[in-house]
Image (cartoon, coloured by chain):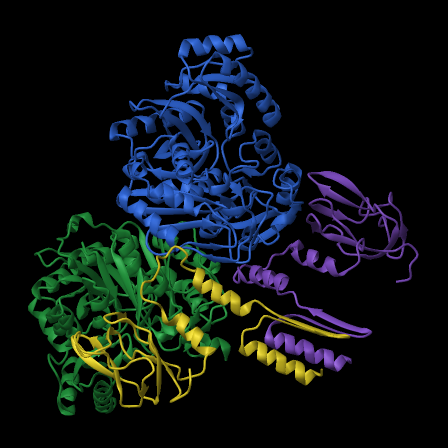
Chain colours: A yellow, B purple, C green, D blue
Amino acid sequence: MNIKEIKEIVTLMNENEITEFIIEREGFKLSIKKGPQFERAAVITQAIAPAAPAIPIPASAGQTGEAKSEPEGTFIVSPMVGTFYSSPSPDLPSFVQVGQEVDEETVVCIIEAMKVMNEIKAERKGKILGVLAENGEAVEFGKKIFKIGDPSAAK
Amino acid sequence: MNIKEIKEIVTLMNENEITEFIIEREGFKLSIKKGPQFERAAVITQAIAPAAPAIPIPASAGQTGEAKSEPEGTFIVSPMVGTFYSSPSPDLPSFVQVGQEVDEETVVCIIEAMKVMNEIKAERKGKILGVLAENGEAVEFGKKIFKIGDPSAAK
Amino acid sequence: MFEKILIANRGEIAIRVIRACRELGIRSVAVYSEADVTSLHTRFADEAICIGPAQSAKSYLNIAAIISAAEIADVEAIHPGYGFLAENAHFAEICESCGIRFIGPRPENIRLMGDKVEAIKAAKRAGVTVIPGSEGVVTDRDAALRIAKRVGYPVMVKAVAGGGGKGMRLAHNDVSLANAFLTAQAEAEAAFGNPAVYVEKRLDHSRHIEVQILADGKGKVIHLFERDCSIQRRHQKLIEESPSPRLSPRTRAKIGRAAVRIAEAIGYVNAGTVEFLLDRDENFYFLEMNTRIQVEHPVTEMVTQVDIVKEQLRISSGHGLKLTQSDVRLLGHAIECRVNAEDWERDFSSCPGKVTMYHAPGGPGVRVDSHVYAGYDIPSYYDSMVSKVICVGHTRESAVTRMQRALDEYVIGGIKTTIPFHRLILSDPRFRKGKYSTDFVDELLEVQKKKKA
Amino acid sequence: MFEKILIANRGEIAIRVIRACRELGIRSVAVYSEADVTSLHTRFADEAICIGPAQSAKSYLNIAAIISAAEIADVEAIHPGYGFLAENAHFAEICESCGIRFIGPRPENIRLMGDKVEAIKAAKRAGVTVIPGSEGVVTDRDAALRIAKRVGYPVMVKAVAGGGGKGMRLAHNDVSLANAFLTAQAEAEAAFGNPAVYVEKRLDHSRHIEVQILADGKGKVIHLFERDCSIQRRHQKLIEESPSPRLSPRTRAKIGRAAVRIAEAIGYVNAGTVEFLLDRDENFYFLEMNTRIQVEHPVTEMVTQVDIVKEQLRISSGHGLKLTQSDVRLLGHAIECRVNAEDWERDFSSCPGKVTMYHAPGGPGVRVDSHVYAGYDIPSYYDSMVSKVICVGHTRESAVTRMQRALDEYVIGGIKTTIPFHRLILSDPRFRKGKYSTDFVDELLEVQKKKKA
C-alpha cells in the first residue's frame, strides 16, 4: 500500500462520511480515524431544539441527506406546497400504478395549491416503484412523492 | 517510509480532519494521533474573549499544556502567590546561580506574601539551568520560577 | 386570540414572532427555503414547511407557496415579519380573500403609504410639515430644475415606489440634477417597475427620527415615543436608540402627536412607524411611513416595556388596545446594534459562511435577537444581518457602556462581523455626546481612511 | 469610584461582578484555581491570577493567597461574591487591615448575623416578630424538650453558626427531638466547629420570603421589595420570584419596613437580605439575615431595574445612595430558575463533565447569567449551578410563560441539567396559581415517584 492508495481511501471516507477505516492482513495493518467535525455539526443542528415538538410535516433535511447516497433520479419530488391527489377525482383510478412505465409527459398526480389543481408530470422515463404520499396528504416543496426506477429495469 | 511520506500523511490528516492514523507492517509501525480535543478547547477558551485585554500575568494554562510534553521535575514552580526575590536583600548575591547544584534543602528564592518572606526550597536534587522570574516580579501559584536539570547532567 | 399562525419570514424576525407566539400560547408554523433547512426558525416553530428553493422569489416571495402552506397547516393568520412580503398590499389582499388574517395593516394602508407621493399628501392633509419639494410626481427634467431653483440646492430625487435607498439620488447643482433625475428614474424602473420620481430639498446635518405607533382599528391610536436612527450607512441603519439624545421634551411630545395624527387620518391599523427628518433647529418633516414591524422595534420594547409583536397579534385577532397613551413611559434608555456578517474594512462586503463558535452576551440589561448558533452555515441568499444586540440602562451613558461590555463578550467565530465597527462608533466622542447626524458614518469612515493612508 | 478591584470568587457571580465593573469603568482582577484555568471569569476579567490548586480550601478559601494576589495586582477593593469568603468576618477584617476595601458589610455586621441566636435577638430588639423558640442557645436535651412543650411540636433544632441546611433537624415528638438535638449538635460541630444549637417552632406550610435591602452607611437604608424563595429542595432554593404571589400590598409594605428596621438597628452597610417565614395567615417571622449579594439578586434587579452589584460598588467606594425608597417600584414580575448540572431523576446527583453544546435563550425579557460555554469542562470541585435564567413580564403569568419559552430554547449538551425539573414545576397547576409553600418540591417529587411506580 502506498501513499496514493491511502489518499484514495481517505477520499472514499470523505465522500461516504466514514469515520473509521481499519484493514488488517498478515503482517499489515492500516487504521484511519476521522475527526468528529461532520458528526458534530449534525448533532448540533438536531439538538438545538431538544424541546421542540415533533414536526408533523417531515423536513426535507433528512431527504437531502439520504439522497446523497442514492443514485440520482430515483425520486419524483413535489415541485410545490399543496395537497397530493393520486387520482383526478375520488371515484376514478389513480393516475399511475406501481410497476407502470411512465415517460416525461405522463401525469402522475395532482397537487392542489390555492384551489388550483396542478397536474404533475413524471418529467423522465421510468418505472414507478412506489407511491410515497397518501391521497389527500399535505406535501411540502421537495417532498418525495414517487420512487421511480430505470425504464423496464427489474426491481 | 521516509520523512517525506510521513509529511504527506500528516498533510492528508490535516486536510481531511483525520484524528488517528496507524499503519503496521512487519517490523514497522507508524501511529499518528491528532488531538483535536485539547487544541479545540484551547481555541475556544482563547476565542471566547476576543476583545479581552492581554492578561499581564501569564495564565498557567499554557504552562500546564507545555509541561505535559516535557519530562517531570524540569521546573521549580511557585507554591504561592506573591513577589519573587532572588536574594535575601537587594545588596546580597542571589541564593542560587545558573549552573549551581542544589539539593532538597537549598533555598532558591524568597516569595513575599502578605508581608511574610517565605523561603522557597528546591525540594529536589539537581542543577539550576535557568531563572525564570525577575527579581521583584509578581508570581502566581504554579508559575515556573526555575528550570532545573538532573544533578551533574551536562546541559 | 389566534390558536395557530404561520410566519412568512426567516431569520431573527421569524424567531421573534415564534417567541411571542409561545408566550401567548399560539402554535406557530415556520416556512423555509431549501437553503434554510438548518435554520433555527424551522427548529423553534411548532411546525415547519419547506416552500421552495433558496432564491427568495421562489420561496419567501412566493405568494402561492405561502398561502398553500397556510392552508395545509390550517392557520388562522400570517405574520409577514419585515422585508419579503411585509409591505405587499397584494399579498395582504390575497390573505384576506383566502380567509387568512394578515397580521399587519389593511391593504389600503400599505398601498397608500407605499406610494411616497401619496404618503406625503396624506401627511400634509393631517397637518404635518413635509419637506419642501415637488408636491407630486415630476415627469420631466425641466420641472425638476424649476423645483430645485425654488427650494434651493442640494435636492434629493426619490422614487415614488421607493424604499431601502433605491432610486434615490442627491444633486448639488443643475448639471448633477439633470443626471440624477434620469438615473433615479432608470433605477426606480429597474427596482420597482415604476419610473416615477419626485424631488425634495435635502436637509443637511439632519437626524432620522421615527415614531412607533400602535392602532387597534377601534379608534385608538397611541405612540411609543421615538427612535433615533441617524447612524446609517447608505440608508441602511446600523445603530438605533430611544429616546433620541437630540429631542427636547417639547418636540418629543409634538412629534409623537404628529405621528398619531397621520395614522388616525388614514385609518391605520396595527403597528407602524412614521419616519421624520429633524433639522438643526429641531423642526421635523414627514419622510415616509413603514407599514410593518421594523428591525429596530426592540429598542422601543426595551425602553417602554411594551411587547410590540404581542400587541400586533392581539390587534389582529380583534382585541382593542388596553394601553392608553399615558400608560406608555420612557423607562431609561435603550440602544441597538445590528451585527452583520460583513467585513467593514473591505467596504462592508458580506461574509457568509459557517459560524464555528458562538457565545452570546448575557447579564443584566442585555437582549440578543439572533438566529445564529455554533455550526450554522449562513446562506448567501439572504441579508447579512446575523444578530441584534439591544442594551438598556437608566441613562444613555449606562446603556452605551453596557453595549460596549456586551459586544466585548460576544463571540461569533468563523465569519467577519460588524462588531469591530460598532466598537469604533460607540467609542467616538461625538457619538458619546449624542451629537451626530445621518452623515456620521460617512465622516467616521473618511477619518478611518485617512488614518490608514 | 474604584479604579481596580479583585473578585474573590468564580463562576457566574464572578462574571456578574466583572460585568458591573466593565460598565462602571473599573478594572477587574480574577483569581482562579488550577481547575478553573479555562473558566470564563478568567477570560472576561482584565487580569487573572492563579491562586492555588483545585480544592477550595487551598484556593478560593485561601485568605493569604487572595490577599497576596490583591496586593500584587494593586487593587483597591475585593468583591467576595457569595459563598466562599463572602460571610467570613475574619476575611473582611484582614482586607481592611491591609488597606483593601471589603465590598460588603462591616465585619461586625457579618459576625452578628452569622450568630443566628444573636441575629434573632437583634431582630426582636428592632421590634420584629421572631419564631417562637428557645430565645438563645440550648445546651441540654431537657431544656430542648421543655421548649418544645411550650411552643408545641413540630420543632426545628438549628445550628447557631448555621447556613445551607447544615446542623438542622426536624422533630415531631419528644423521642425524635431527643435524637435530633444530639445529631444537630454533632453536625454543627463537624460543619462549623461550633456545636451550639437552638430550638424553634416549625411553621407548617409556610413560605420563605426575603427582603433585599441596601444601606449606604450614611444613614440611608432602603428595601427593594421581597423575593419569594419557597421553591426549595433540602433548603436549597430552586426558583425565586418577585413580587411574592402571596403577599397583600399591606403585608408587603410591612415586611419591607421590618427589614429596613433590622438593618438600621444593627448599623448595617451595603447590600443584604433579611429572610422571613410567612405563615398561612400572612404573619411573618424573622428567620435570619444574609450579609452578602445573593444568588437570586437578579430577580430583584429585573423587577425594580436597580443594579444591585453596581450599588454595592458605589456604596463601598463611599458614595451615598441616590435612590430613595419612593424611587423603587415593582415594574411587573420576575422569576429565576437555577439550572444545575444535576440529574433530578437520580436524586439530583451532580453531573459534572464537558458541555458539548451551548445555546442560551434570547429575545425579550430574558436574562441569562452563566459562566458556561461550548467546550467548557465543568469541574467537580465546586457547586453544580451552571446558569441562572431570569425572565420578566408585566404579570406573573407572562413571566412564567416566558420562562417556559426560554427553557424550551435552552441547549446545554453533554451534561444533565435540572431544566426538565424546572419545566415540571412551571407547568404544575398549583405553581401556576402561586399557591405553594416550602413543602412544594417534596410533594411534587412524591407525586412523580408514585407515577413511576
| Direction from residue C60 to residue C410 in the image, left or right | right
Q: Nearer the viewer, residue C278 or C314?
A: C314
| Direction from residue D2 to residue C50 in the image, left or right | left
State the image quarter where residue D434 is shown.
top left
Relative to D403, residue C50 above or below: below
Relative to C23, residue C154 above or below: below
Q: What is the x, y in percent for residue C27?
A: 26, 57
x 62%, y 65%: residue: B36
Count up the numbered dots.
0
Q: What is the x, y in percent for residue B93?
A: 86, 49
Q: Nearer the viewer, residue C209 or A90?
A: A90
Q: What is the x, y in percent for residue D232?
A: 42, 34
Relative to D125, residue C364 above or below: below
Q: Nearer the viewer, residue D135 or C181?
A: D135
For the C terminus of chain D, the quadrant is: top left
Q: What is the x, y in percent for residue D167?
A: 54, 24
State the image quarter where residue D154 is shown.
top left
| Direction from residue A34 to residue B75 in the image, left or right | right
Relative to C149, residue D329 above or below: above
Can residue C372 be spotted in the picture?
yes
x 61%, y 44%: residue: D70
Farthest right residue in view = B152
x 52%, y 65%: residue: A40
State the image quarter where residue C51 is shown.
bottom left
Q: Nearer the viewer, residue D203 or D11?
A: D203
Can residue C113 be spotted in the picture?
no
